[in-house]
Structures are given as structure tokens and as C-alpha cells.
Amino acid sequence: MTEDKAAPAGGSILVVGGGISGLTTTLEAAEVGYEVFLVEKNPYLGGRVAQLNQYFPKLCPPTCGLEINFRRIKDNPKIKILTLAEVEKVDGTPGNYDVSIKLNPRYVNENCTCCGDCSEVCQTEISSEFNFGMNKIKGVYLPFEMAFPARYVISPEIIGTEDTKRCAEACKYDAIDLEMQAKTIDLKVGAIVWATGWEPYDAAKIDNLGFGQYPNIITNMMLERLASPNGPTKGKITRPSDNKELESIAFVQCAGSRDENHLPYCSYICCMASLKHATYIRERYPDAKIYIFYIDLRAPGQRYEKFYKTIKEDENIFFVKGKVAEVNEDPDTKNITVVAENAVTGEKIKQTVEMAVLATGMQPTTVAAKLPADLKYNEDGFIINDFEKGGMFATGCANKPADVVSSNQNATGMALKAIQTLVNR
């Protein structure tokens, strides 16, 4: 299996997006005998799940599910992987699509053994997108320990510098190819599944919540990375301004969600994510005070409801029903004061904590840049499935806000829809 030698094939399926939904769709279709091309814009598969410390329902690390899926993909000759790839154009009708895909250069070929010699000699550091800019990484990097494909990447930022020459000289396996160029390949496929995923809403747009103004206000996905063993702090959760261990923390729910000025809808995952984050804090700081400010707490399903009840029993976790109006910082201590009106008592609450976490919602990646295909979107940017027309389908968070379990179930259904398109053509 190679990334850049995929040939057009009739009766095949194109899956766009290598997150958990895309992986599930790909495997479900390939394991019943269909040829699948999996296109991913990043240099690795795994999507947002790869960035998590733990995910529901079992609170296991992403390595759990991803490792099995990567193994299944590696062992299946029906699957062709195209990373650092983007769909540029889609023409045709259900059962007969012509697709142009741009392949961006990785500058590292299949000879790479992940020895790390190239990274060791690289002197340039770049901001880590994987860790939401919370640390710097080398300009030549492995995206994360179990990245698939298991191959280093050279950032375009350092191409043409002395660093790239040093890297090429350090490589014993002739794996660095600085002459790689972007190229376009054409595929013929019968069905397309869009699993283009989601991105966190930009918390800097929420003027009253202080993100970007005060260092000790972070987002829920930033906390996820802080808690991760492969994150910027190797799993140690401390407040950014001074690395102090936490004695108190506030979670601000619906940060930008259910708000006509930002995201008018509920993002489905935020409540459960914050409850999960409370377990991260409790594990590291047994006596810390945890305050959760919410509009409504949504725990969809019996298993999630049970999890919520367990969290509620913790005497140092305080639930406050009230939308946060503003946050302020004490310039001397860098502590954060969260201001809200208690919806039950009507009183104004001011709670001072050492750090605050904004539970920002999810937006489809298609909200700003629409896909180059004949697709319908709702007013929030999610793709609307037209099952009557068929041929192209959206799954996971490209279609609606969803957790990992729901995304997997939905992806299985969309794999079947894609197969039906081929069978009925």
C-alpha cells in the first residue's frame, strides 16, 4: 500500500476525512470487499480522537481504538491511503464520479523508519497545531507516537533552509526527498462519503469570556491536550501563567453555544466533556474545588446519566445553574473571577478560581470553506444528506454534532449507503 500510487478504479468508494467516522466508514466498506480510497488533509489519520486524553464511553485512551483500526487498515489491500491530500473537484453522478485530488508534499518517503535522527539535528521550532499552539515542536516531526502512516513530516515552513540540508544529511535511509512537489491525481469512484469532521469554535470571538486576554483561561480541547501523556506538559495539568498546581477551577458551559451571536445550536458533547474533565482534575488534585457553571446539563442516555450522577456525589464539585456573563482577572494573582446569575436563586454569583476552562462547541470544518461538490448545507454549515439523490453522503460531525459512539454508528450506516449506490448503479 502506497500513498501516491493509487490508480483509478470503478465501483470504488471515496472517503474524505480520516477521523473516527472516516476510519469506520472505510473499514466497514473495505472489509466486505469494496475498494476504498481514504483521503486525509493532515499527515496522519485519527482526527480529533487522536488529540484526546480519554474518550467515552469507557474513558480509555485513543490508542485503544485507533491502534486496532490502524492495524485493520494496514492489513487490508482494498484500502488506499492518501494523506496530506485535499479534494479539489468532483464531477459526475451517483455511481460515476470523477474526482481530482491534490497531494501535498511530505518531503519524507516510505524509507522512513521513524529513527528521529532528522528531528534531532533540526534547529528550527514551529508552533504545535496538534497541541493548539501551547508548545513548540521541531520543524521535522512525528505527529504523535503512534501516528499512521508512521513517518516523519517536514514542515513547509523550513523548506529551503539550512535545517532541511542538515536533516537530509542525517538520514541514513535516504528517506528525505526535498524535491517532492505537490501533484494532482484523478480518481473514478462510485460513491463518496464526506467525513470532514469538526473544529473547536474560536473562543477568542466570545468577547466577554476573556480567552486570549487572560492566560489562565483555556478551552476544553486545550485541557484535553494538557491531560494527555503526549501533550505539551506530558499529562501534568497546571495553570499556564505560572505552572501552579490547582486548588480550584471553573468550567464554563455553552461557551458560544446556544447563542445566536455565535453557535445557535447545542454541540451535544460539551457537558459530558466537562464532566470527564472534572475526573482529570480530581485524579490529579484530590482536594481541588471544581465549579461547573451551566445552562442545562445534558447527559444523553443511561450510561452518561449514570456518569453524571457519580460526578454529582463528589462533595468538592459544585454545579451552578446560570450562564456566565463575564470573567475578570486579578492582575496580581492572575486568578480568575467568574460572574454569573444563579438561575435557581436569582442571586449574582462571583466565584474566584485559579483557572477557567471554556467548554467551546463544535463547528463543522465546512462552515467557512464549502466542499468542491454538489452538496447541501444547513444554516450552521453541516452537510444535509440527500438520500433520494444518493451517491454522496456526510457522516459524523460533518452531518451533525456527535460523540464517538454516535459517529461510529452513523459511519456504519453511511458505509452501507455508499455500498447501495454501487450495487444499484
Image: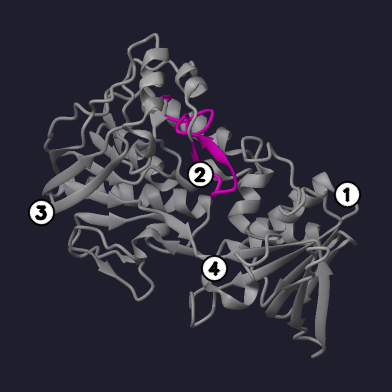
Q: How is the image coloured?
A: one colour
Q: Which residue is tagged 4?
A: 204
Q: CA distance from mark 2 to mark 3?
A: 37 Å
Q: Are marks 1 and 4 in contact (CB under 8 Å)?
A: no
Question: Crowding at label 1, few (<14), some or many (≥20) Cα neighbours within 10 Å?
Answer: few
Q: Which residue is tagged 2?
A: 127
**On residue 286, which mark appears?**
1
Residue 143 position within the rendered picture, expressed as x and y whole percent measured from the top left: 48, 34
Question: Crowding at label 4, few (<14), some or many (≥20) Cα neighbours within 10 Å?
Answer: few
Q: CA distance from mark 1 to mark 2?
A: 33 Å
Q: Is residue 396 visible?
A: yes
Residue 353 position within the rendered picture, expressed as x and y whole percent measured from the top left: 81, 65
Q: Is residue 57 visible?
A: no
Left or right of 36 on screen, residue 22: right
Sequence-wise, the earlier of marks 3 and 1 is 3
User: What is the span of residues highlighted in magenta in the rendered image?
Assistant: 125-151
The kind of secondary structure the magenta stretch mainly shows is: loop
What is the secondary structure assignment of the residue under circle 1?
Answer: loop
